[in-house]
Amino acid sequence: MPTDEDTAPIAPAGVDTDKPSAARIYDWYLGGTHNWAVDREFGKRAVQLWPGMKAMAQQNRAFMNRVVETALDAGIRQFIDLGSGVPTVGNIHEIIRRRLPDEGSATDVYVDYEPVAAAHSTVILEKDDATGWAAIVQRDLRDPDGVLDDEATRDLIDFDEPVCLLLIAVMHFIGPHDDPDKITATYRSRLAPGSWLAISHASIDDAPADETTAGVRRMIDTYRSTSNPMWLRDRAEFVPWFGDWNLLEPGITRLPHWRPDREPTEEELEASSFGWGGVAENRS
């Protein structure tokens, strides 16, 4: 039987596979193969602290998929995924290709500041023959103007037309010292009427005061020792990031309850207590 090492991809040039990467750890949570032993070991430790970690990651991916499909149904044809990590296991360019018969009728820009994520993304997009309408921009999402004015972004995105901007499971890596309110406000100010903003975030407000919640706190503390520390925020801190844009139904909710396409499992419902998600539209 093949081992994890047998199925791991060849490392792109310059990628360090001796240090864990948040992007590749998340890929492992999702069941992907773009990860190495060091990433899996970190992920396994996190799961030991909170067994619901994989379910939470999968909820975020499913939430993102439903947002993208709903945006496509609404006629939006431009997507920017901030903090995209490794674009594998059901990511945006795959959804576009599946839903739209005309290649290039929609565009997709992935954004991640980690060289390892950018390197893997380049390989994946080239392998998927998607480089004509999808790109990776190696920028820090904390620099909105740098991201939006990047040449690759400008090549694929027309900012006079609606854009679906996604911040999925990434804002909890943005600390209070980074001024997340200003970051999100700047992105909103650059997007045309009809644009959508989708955000999900880790949280423990309203979560049960039990060992599970304590495990989540310990898991968050584990990330504090990495280059990608995490912050938990409550719903009141999350809401202002949508500004005066109109929240789409059902508003800010637990991830499995945003326009579900199936009944969530018991494990998914338990994990859902530890995150919020929502989508808003610019109707100005």
Image (cartoon, rainbow, N blue to C red):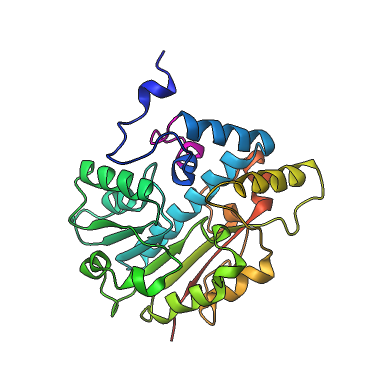
Q: Where 198 falls versus 273 (above or below)?
A: below
Q: Is residue 52 left or right of residue 101?
A: right
Q: Which quarter of the image is occupied by the N terminus?
A: top left
Using the rendered view, name the quadrant where residue 53 is placed: top right
Where is residue 209? Give x, y as percent.
82, 50
Q: Where 35 falls versus 180 (above or below)?
A: above
Measuring 38% from the left and 81% from the top, which residue is drawn there? 193
Measuring 21% from the left and 62% from the top, which residue is drawn there? 105
- Write down the region rendered in magenta: 27-36
Q: Nearer the viewer, residue 165 or 126?
A: 126
Instruction: Give the residue furthest to the top.
Output: 1
Where is residue 182? Give x, y as percent.
52, 77
Q: Nearer the viewer, residue 88 or 17?
A: 17
Where is residue 243? Give x, y as percent.
54, 79
Task: Give the main secondary structure, helix, strand or loop, of the magenta stretch.
Answer: loop
Q: Is residue 70 left or right of residue 267?
A: left
Q: Nearer the viewer, residue 239 or 122?
A: 122
Measuring 29% from the left and 77% from the top, which residue is drawn there? 159
The total of numbered circles placed on residues is 0
Q: Which quarter of the image is occupied by the C terminus?
A: bottom left
Residue 154 located within the stretch drawn in magenta: no
Measuring 43% from the left and 31% from the top, which residue is drawn there? 36
Q: Where 268 falls versus 136 (above or below)?
A: above
Where is residue 233? Give x, y as percent.
66, 62
